[in-house]
Image (cartoon, rainbow, N blue to C red):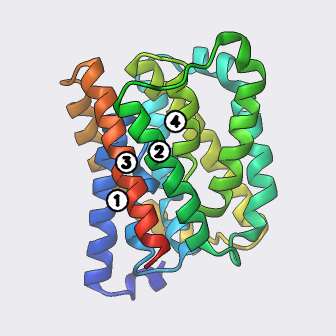
Amino acid sequence: MTEFLDLGTPVLAACAAAMIAGGVVKGVVGIGLPLVALPVMVNFIPVHKAIALLILSSFATSVWQSYHGGQFTPSVKRFWPLLIGIAIGVAISVKALATFDIRLLYLILGVIVVTFASVLHRKLVFTVAPRAERWAAPLTGIAAGLVGGLSMLFGPVYAMYLAGLKLGKESFVAAISLSNVWATVVLAVAMAQFDLLSGADLAASLLALIPSSAGVLLGTWLRRHINEDAFLKMLAVVLFLIGLNLIRRAFA
């Protein structure tokens, strides 16, 4: 953990602010911690170190959100094919984390997210029929795992799928939080196998729980005071801004 502390106060403050902002977004819309925090932190620390710093925060806040609404068991029963797909995708992609051109990944993902957010804001979201879940869920999971194994940016991929199911806001947050929990565990295990995650990284990640948790608590309070339409608009705006930022990072 000392290598993180040696970065200096300005860098640590920037990382903490990024995690608070990401936590607020995650508390409101169920995703956003890595999506908001990671692009900021990679300006100061290597990508794999930024991912390591977010591991425990993403896991802990997702566990809390997953259980908080009392929909954990129904979510597992419905979305287990999505979870299996995520594991497969991560197993394939994480070994390339140390060498993959992250700028190319930012560009591809940014374009996808901006497009989806624009469609969502205009209420033209595609609908996933119940009969299609059998094949759409595992394919979505694999795609999310392939992207997330390289960048930890799982959220936009399965957010698109879950939004297409027309879930209520609490069910949406419960489902995406469950996916986040599973994705984070699988990613941590895979990173450890390829020596991309050490005990010192986990110690620093534990300390990072403080700003991220504070942000999620604030965001959760805000979510209780907005209606369904406002929730969907908030999701669209957040995804659009995140997508633009990812595109910016691709050309930075």
Front of the two marks 3 and 4: 3
Q: Residue at x 52, y 44 (%)?
A: 156
Secondary structure, mark 1, is: helix
First in sequence: mark 3 vs mark 1: 1
Which amino acid is tagged 1?
Met
* Residue 1 position in % (x across, y down): 48, 77
Measured in 3D between alpha carbons, the distance from the residue under mark 2 to the one under mark 3, in whole angstroms, is 8 Å
- Is residue 127 shown above or below 114? above
Which amino acid is tagged 3?
Phe
First in sequence: mark 3 vs mark 4: 4
Mark 1, residue position: 19
Measured in 3D between alpha carbons, the distance from the residue under mark 2 to the one under mark 4, in whole angstroms, is 13 Å
Measured in 3D between alpha carbons, the distance from the residue under mark 3 to the one under mark 4, in whole angstroms, is 13 Å
* Residue 171 position in % (x across, y down): 46, 19
Mark 2, residue position: 115
Label number found at residue 240 = 3
Is residue 106 in sight in this rendering? yes
User: Dividing the picture into quarters, in which one does residue 138 lie?
Assistant: top right
Secondary structure, mark 3, is: helix
Mark 4, residue position: 159
Measured in 3D between alpha carbons, the distance from the residue under mark 4 to the one under mark 1, in whole angstroms, is 20 Å
First in sequence: mark 2 vs mark 4: 2
- Is residue 114 shown above or below 203? above
Is residue 211 in sight in this rendering? no
- Is residue 88 shown above or below 120? below
- Is residue 135 shown above or below 10? above
Front of the two marks 2 and 1: 2
Q: Residue at x 66, y 11 (%)?
A: 130
* Residue 181 position in % (x across, y down): 57, 40
Mark 4 Cα-neighbour bin, 10 Å: few <14, some 14–19, many ≥20 = many
